[in-house]
């Protein structure tokens, strides 16, 4: 095989400003000093040419390798299709690990458990995310026959996995991400459901409870159900299904965790049941996989398959263009399987046997905007079914064509397709709707099948400027209605929504809805519509307002079961920040409250030691000296500028007040929550953090040293947003994960 050379007149890709930041930080090849030595054009050609090179293996291909490389390059640089992040990062490199999703088995033995830890570390290092089922592990306090000891249970080992993940940096670019699943009938299920009651626990895991239809039927009838020891198959007792379901709903209401997956639905869509049971999914839940299986993903930008109407006719979907993109994308993803170097031989074998790919979509909200269809309408739901059926049907057609050229996937005969004589197909699965938080920033489109989180929002850029960014289709509609103005954009940026702006045209307010404008059931109906014609599953968040009740979540979970979804993730706005209010005061919190009432100012000792931290601010260099007692901050001195200046005086005053608070016993967390995010007139980036003001700089130093990098929101409002650890902007929760719209940071890798 010969890698195609870059054509002399290859056009430069057009890169939006956000994409430039993302590509620079995460995708361009860098030297040992972290300096990129690759251009945007070279990046896309590296990926296109290395994936097209695999075509040379197949004598019956309908493409010449050099022509296919150019097709792939044009496909990506027009942003009609983009592959998952590991492919963009690693294609054509020595690492060469191109898949995003992996599932590893966790066997009920010390050897099996720590093999899984080791294998997960190898996958995270290569840029992938991992899913685990802990359902095989015997329950806490059960006897271990080989030693006579007592088992510590799934939760203890889950914490070990979480700790190991914290130490591994994915290919120098991403923190590892995991999914942990436990069956509803496991004896330790109640511990699992409550595992993330405290914010910050298991921070490298998404958790989902594996529900069965038998359990859901017991919920409906209010009956008890059996808990089953996984190592013996014997019953260990019973729980009331409705009570367990209520607690599951309560925890989701409090913090968004855990989510749920419907194991029987997943099993029914398993294309290769002879190879075993699907126990888990990848970190965001959209890719159920067998143990040691992986899948590479890619997404089509639906916003770019809109065809303008002619002669006064309304626009429509360009079905021919969509079909062309699907066929080319399926070929791309099948070639990725051959081009990828997998981290374990077991994975290489399983992937080669089933050749699963996951082609999905993004830009759905953009397409609806152009068509003038409200997201929260039956017309949008019907179109979702039609679009995804078309993508699945054309994807399977493309897979059949590849099978004719290259042969069916090796396990075809024993698969459901082989037994039903439906193929042959090249791939056991073709479609998945995955999160596209980073890809959508590169492509300049809306994420996945989600509605927009905000029509307009303010973003701080590297030089400290504040830019207002607006969805281009929304801006165009306002201009066409002669309703656009810079002042209006500023107003929209305050909330991101126009739902209460009655002075705007009704049709604009109906079409341009955001995630929080949409009733939860429409979110769910949209997910179900796409799921109907998706081989694997759909990554989607059902967004809820802060005032949503537990009954609302109960109904969403139940309807997700009735609608045929394979799982569901809910997120109530501001729930993590208001969790103490949700759950009531714990004993620890009551003691803290009592302690606050008895505070007195401690005297300063004659000798005290500390450190000085230099912080670049927009007002000059701040030198923050922090003196400590017993490893905790006792007093601070903030110095900036020349003595006698007003800024110096303000810094000194802030330092004195913070010192008084510390000597009075106020916790660091409380001080940070008050100072974090206070804005100033000259914000400035320092490394990966946006320093907004002198108080914000003090909060940054305290966070970094005393809170292990845990990010706290600004102020005490219950709707405080979690902040991005890389750029300081607010994170949003969509597609099952916290992501940053400014720099593309994501908690899910």
Image (cartoon, rainbow, N blue to C red):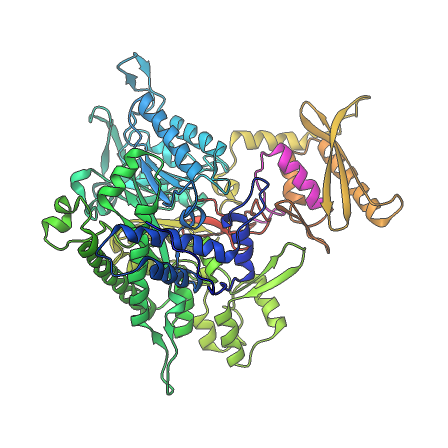
x and y, in percent, of residue 126 in the image? 42, 39
Quarter of the image with the C terminus is top left
User: Is 714 a magenta residue?
Assistant: yes
The residue lying at 52 percent from left, 45 percent from top is 578
> Residue 720 lies in magenta, yes or no?
no
**592 above or below 535?**
above
The answer to whether residue 334 is above or below residue 590 is: below
Q: Nearer the viewer, residue 385 or 177?
A: 177
Report the side of 245 relative to 656 (left or right).
Answer: left
Q: Residue at x 51, y 70 (%)?
A: 472
Q: Is residue 54 left or right of residue 549?
A: left
Residue 452 rendering spot, x and y as whole percentages: 46, 62
Q: How many marks?
A: 0
Can residue 360 be seen from the camera position used here? yes
* Image-quadrant location for residue 700: top right
User: Which residue is situated farthest in the bottom direction here?
Assistant: 311
Q: Quadrant of residue 276?
A: top left
The answer to whether residue 83 is seen in the rendering is no
Q: Which residues are magenta?
A: 695-718
Q: Is residue 469 above or below residue 335?
A: below
Residue at point 41%, 30% (across, down): 161
Residue at x 29% of width, y 66% of height: 323
Most extreme residue toward the right, as rendered? Answer: 644
User: Percent from the top left, x then y, of residue 183?
Assistant: 28, 36
Quick one: 564 or 690, which is closer to the camera? 690
Q: Position of residue 641 (x, y in %)?
A: 83, 45
């Amino acid at each position: 095989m010969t890698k195609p050379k870059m054509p002399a007149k290859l056009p430069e890709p057009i890169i939006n400003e956000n994409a430039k930041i993302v590509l620079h930080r995460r995708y361009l090849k860098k030297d040992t000093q972290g300096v990129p030595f690759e251009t945007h054009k070279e990046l896309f050609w590296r990926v296109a040419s290395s994936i097209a090179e695999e075509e040379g293996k197949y004598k019956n291909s309908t493409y010449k390798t050099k022509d296919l490389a150019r097709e792939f390059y044009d496909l990506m640089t027009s942003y009609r299709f983009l592959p998952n992040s590991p492919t963009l990062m690693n294609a054509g490199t020595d690492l060469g690990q191109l898949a995003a999703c992996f599932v590893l088995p966790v066997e009920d033995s010390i050897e099996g458990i720590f093999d899984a830890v080791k294998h997960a570390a190898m996958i995270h290092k290569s840029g992938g995310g991992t899913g685990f089922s802990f359902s095989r592990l015997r329950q806490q306090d059960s006897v271990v026959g080989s030693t006579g000891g007592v088992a510590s249970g799934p939760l203890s080992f889950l914490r070990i996995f979480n700790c190991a993940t914290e130490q591994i940096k994915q290919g120098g670019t991403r923190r590892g991400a995991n999914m942990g699943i436990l069956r509803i009938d496991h004896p330790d299920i109640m511990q699992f459901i409550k595992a993330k009651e405290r914010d910050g626990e298991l921070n490298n895991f998404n958790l989902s409870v594996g529900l069965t239809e038998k359990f859901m039927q017991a919920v409906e009838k209010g009956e008890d159900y059996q808990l089953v020891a996984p190592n013996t198959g014997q019953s260990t007792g019973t729980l009331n299904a409705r009570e367990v379901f209520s607690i599951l709903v309560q925890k989701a209401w409090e913090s968004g965790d855990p989510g749920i997956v419907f194991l029987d639905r997943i099993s029914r869509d398993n294309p290769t049941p002879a190879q075993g049971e699907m126990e888990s999914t990848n970190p965001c839940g959209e890719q159920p996989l067998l143990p040691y299986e992986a899948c590479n993903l890619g997404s089509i930008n639906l916003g770019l398959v809109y065809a303008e109407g002619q002669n006064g006719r309304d626009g429509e979907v360009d079905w021919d263009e969509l079909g062309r993109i699907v066929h080319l994308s399926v070929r791309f993803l099948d070639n990725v399987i051959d081009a990828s170097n997998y981290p374990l031989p077991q994975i290489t074998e399983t992937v080669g046997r089933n050749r699963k790919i996951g082609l999905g979509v993004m830009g759905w909200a953009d397409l609806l905007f152009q068509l003038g269809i409200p997201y929260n309408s039956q017309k949008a739901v019907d179109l979702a079914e039609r679009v995804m059926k078309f993508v699945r049907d054309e994807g399977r057609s493309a897979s059949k064509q590849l099978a004719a050229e290259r042969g069916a996937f090796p396990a075809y005969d024993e698969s459901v397709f082989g037994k039903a004589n439906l193929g042959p197909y090249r791939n056991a699965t073709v479609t998945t709707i995955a999160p596209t938080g980073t890809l959508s920033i590169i492509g300049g489109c809306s994420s996945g099948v989600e509605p927009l989180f905000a029509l307009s929002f303010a973003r701080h850029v590297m030089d400290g400027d504040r830019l207002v960014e607006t969805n281009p289709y929304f801006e165009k509609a306002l201009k066409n209605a002669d309703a656009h103005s810079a002042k209006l954009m500023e107003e929209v940026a305050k909330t991101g929504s126009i739902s209460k702006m009655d002075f705007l045209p009704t049709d604009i307010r109906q079409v341009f809805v955001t995630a929080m404008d949409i009733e939860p059931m429409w979110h769910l109906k949209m997910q179900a519509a796409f799921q109907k014609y998706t081989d694997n599953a759909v990554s989607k968040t059902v967004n809820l307002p802060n005032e949503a009740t537990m009954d609302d979540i109960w109904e969403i979970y139940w309807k997700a079961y009735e609608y045929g979804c394979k799982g569901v993730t809910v997120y109530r706005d501001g729930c993590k920040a208001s969790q103490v209010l949700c759950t009531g005061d714990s004993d620890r919190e009551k003691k803290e409250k009592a302690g606050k009432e008895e505070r007195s100012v401690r005297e300063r000792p004659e000798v005290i030691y500390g450190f000085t931290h230099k912080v670049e601010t927009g007002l000059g260099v701040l030198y923050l000296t922090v003196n400590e007692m017993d490893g905790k901050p006792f007093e601070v001195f903030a110095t900036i500028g020349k003595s006698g200046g007003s800024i110096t005086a303000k810094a000194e005053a802030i330092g004195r007040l913070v010192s008084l608070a510390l000597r009075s016993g106020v916790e660091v967390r409380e001080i940070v929550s008050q100072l974090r995010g206070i804005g100033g007139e000259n914000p400035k980036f320092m490394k990966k953090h946006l320093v907004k003001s002198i108080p914000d700089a003090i909060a940054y130093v305290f966070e970094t040293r005393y809170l292990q990098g845990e990010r706290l929101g600004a102020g005490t409002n219950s709707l405080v947003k979690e902040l991005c650890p890389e750029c300081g902007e607010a994170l949003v929760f969509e597609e099952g994960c916290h992501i940053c719209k400014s720099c593309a940071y994501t908690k899910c890798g």
